[in-house]
Amino acid sequence: MSDQNDKKQQKLNIQIDDDVAQGIYSNLAIINHSQTEFVLDFVNIMPGAPKNKVRSRIILTPQHAKRLMRALSDNISRFEKSQGSIKEQDKTNIPLNFGGPTGEA
């Protein structure tokens, strides 16, 4: 019984490096998946730039992708309750030259 209580009381110790803490701006997410993983590529599209690079890639298991979706949905709901509705812009068609099948968010 005490092992279960010890496990419940353990806290995660998370550290973040200064360069990671600065974050990376992204205005396009490209989402791909296979049977075993979801790949989220974050891109910063700049007007007039001939090439735009993937700035960050996150690879998740399907279970973690679903948890991320739920956590993001919950946070958006809480944000909108306190700040008001987030207005969505009309979807713009961005021609992607990106190897393999793609989805976007």
Image: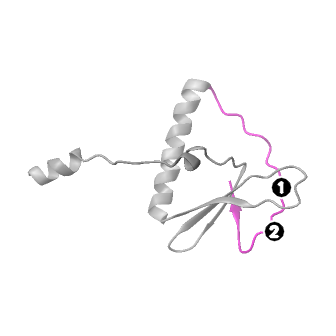
Tell me which colouring the rendered structure shows: one colour
Q: Residue at x 15, y 47 (%)?
A: 5
Measured Cα–Cα span from mark 2 to mark 1: 13 Å
For disc 2, the marked residue is: 97
The label nearer to you, 2 versus 1, is: 2
Answer whether labels 2 and 1 touch (C-beta < 8 Å).
Answer: no
Q: Give me the residue at 69% from left, 62% from top.
A: 103
Q: Residue at x 53, y 43 (%)?
A: 73
Residue 20 appears left or right of 5: right
Of residue 20 and residue 105, the one placed in the foreground of this image is 20
Q: Secondary structure at mark 2?
A: loop
x%, y% of residue 85?
64, 30
Q: Which residue sits at x=71%, y=72%?
A: 101
* Amino acid at the residue labelled 2: Asn
Alpha-carbon neighbours of circle 2 within 10 Å: few (<14), some, or many (≥20)?
few
Read off the magenta span. 84-105
In the drawing, does residue 82 fall left or right of residue 102?
left
Q: Main secondary structure of the magenta part?
A: loop
Residue 19 percent coordinates (x, y): 58, 49
The label number, if any, that marks residue 93 in the structure image: 1
Residue 11's spot in the image, x, y percent?
29, 46
